[in-house]
Amino acid sequence: MQRLLGYMMDMVGRKHRGISMITSFSISRVSIQGFAAEQNSMSVDGIRKAFQATEEGFLSLIASQWLTKPQMSSVGSCCLVGVICDGTLYVANLGDSWTILGRLVKATGEVLALQLSAEHNAIIESVRQELHSMHPDDPQIVVVKHNVWCVKGLIHISRSIVDLYLKNVEFNKEPLYAKFRLREPFKRPILSADPSISVHELEPHDQFLILSSDGLWEHLSNQEAVDIVQNSSHKEQGMDMLSGKSICIVARLSQHFVQHNEELLWCYTLFSNGTN
């Protein structure tokens, strides 16, 4: 089989009311590798199936515990995946985490920031248009709450892992807390677990990837984040500087394979479990 490096780079869990949903990065990592093995190659379809398998796994878990832990249905996660296989980078995203590529411009020596992931946040007009087109019979599918656009006035993102209370009407009723229950039952899922997936052929001048939750991009522009990493004496130092602002991983690119820090990756997944 082709050499494969696939890592769950970001599953940013949210914790409500003291109930923590553990988002296991190993589920999607194993799923991605499993579907790749079936096809003997990496593919967009295989990654999409891995997301679906992860979603279905959580659906089964929450359904089995609905009577004793109904609030689990209101917990979800953004999800960002980076996979490199044979010099090709696959980026899959649900929610508002970003992947930025630092690419060296040989003529000037500058490292420019290239955004590789799509963002699914209701503050973006195209996302609101997508929601309206998917729910033409619901004029309140996106509303302004506290001066920010929100899906049904409850959540900023339009795609996620879990958040079953906005995907399956069976989980949007008592004993779920009233503040999460919609007044009218919905006919189709409000949020989606279908990721945006982009494919990029890595080039010799590609230096590193930054994969981060939305907290980083609230403080820094894409180029500012790239400059911090590039100007650090070691890329690991740049990683530490960035991760102080959010959940973040910097992966260096060498001969089209990711060189990563296993300890940081493990700490990262532990930190992301059940964070707000």
Image: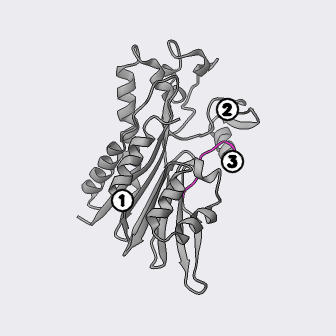
Residue 235 vertical position relative to residue 190 in the rendered view, above or below: below
Residue 206 vs residue 152, the one in the foreground:
206
Amino acid type shown at disc 3: Ile
What is the C-alpha distance between the residues marked 3 and 1? 34 Å
Whole-percent x and y of residue 199? 47, 63
Residue at the image point whose x is 35% and y is 34% from the top: 57
Nearer-N-terminus badge (2/1): 2
Residue 168 vertical position relative to residue 52 in the rendered view, above or below: above
What is the C-alpha distance between the residues marked 2 and 1? 42 Å
Left or right position of 67 against 100: left
Q: Which residue is mark 1?
A: 261
Residue 254 vertical position relative to residue 148 in the rendered view, above or below: below
Q: Which residue is mark 3?
A: 124
Whole-percent x and y of residue 15? 50, 30
Q: How is the image coloured?
A: one colour
**Magenta-colored stretch includes residue 122:** yes
Label 3: state its secondary structure: loop
Nearer-N-terminus badge (3/2): 3
* Mark toward the viewer: 3 or 1: 1
* Mark toward the viewer: 3 or 2: 3
Which quadrant would residue 140 be assigned to in this image? Answer: top right
Residue 195 vertical position relative to residue 135 in the rendered view, above or below: below
Residue 135 vs residue 63, the one in the foreground:
63
Residue at the image point whose x is 67% and y is 32% from the top: 141
Which region is colored magenta? Answer: 117-126
Q: How many numbered dots are placed on residues in this image? A: 3
Amino acid type shown at disc 2: Ile
Label 2: state its secondary structure: loop
Q: Which residue is mark 2?
A: 141
Nearer-N-terminus badge (3/1): 3
**Magenta-colored stretch includes residue 273:** no
**The residue positioned farthest toward the left in the image shown:** 1
